[in-house]
Amino acid sequence: DPLFRTRPGSVIIEGNWKLHYYYEDGGIELYDLNSDPGERKNLASINTIKTAELLAKLEVWLKEEQAPVQFELNPHFDSLFEQELIAEFY
């Protein structure tokens, strides 16, 4: 996400790879932190093998740790406002 916000999700980092998984819509983002430290180019649809690998590891970790997962949406999140900010600053 180009802007910090509170929305239900989990992240896994392995080496130079970082995967975001969002519970509200099943959205997945994959970034190569070496070449893209600002997380601007989502590689999830390009590097599907790494995406699947990290998502599987995240799911295993969440289950093993019995990690609480927040599924409720942030009632204060305004997607239209977010899009306006993205358009203006990114």
Image (cartoon, rainbow, N blue to C red):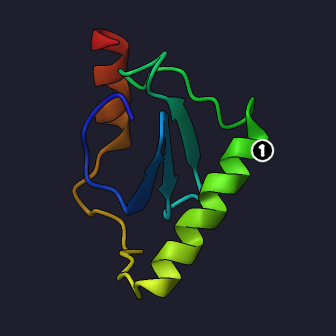
Query: Relative to 61, is 12 above or below?
Result: above
Q: Quadrant of the N terminus?
A: top left
Please state which of residues 38 and 60 is positioned toward the viewer in this rendering.
Answer: 60
- The residue lying at 41 percent from left, 88 percent from top is 66
Total marks in image:
1
Q: Residue at x 24, y 39 (%)?
A: 4
- Identify the residue shown where x is 62% and y is 59%: 55
Q: Position of residue 3 (x, y in %)?
A: 28, 32
Look at the picture and state if 32 lies above or below 65. above
**Which residue is disc 1 drawn over?**
49
Label 1 residue SS: helix
The x and y percentages for residue 61 are 49, 74
Image coordinates for residue 69, horizontal then vertical, percent: 39, 77
Q: Is residue 85 above or below residue 15?
A: above
Question: Which quadrant holds the C terminus?
Answer: top left
Relative to 86, residue 82 above or below: below
Query: Looking at the image, which is closer to me, 85 or 57?
Result: 57
Q: In this rendering, would 11 be left or right of 75?
A: right
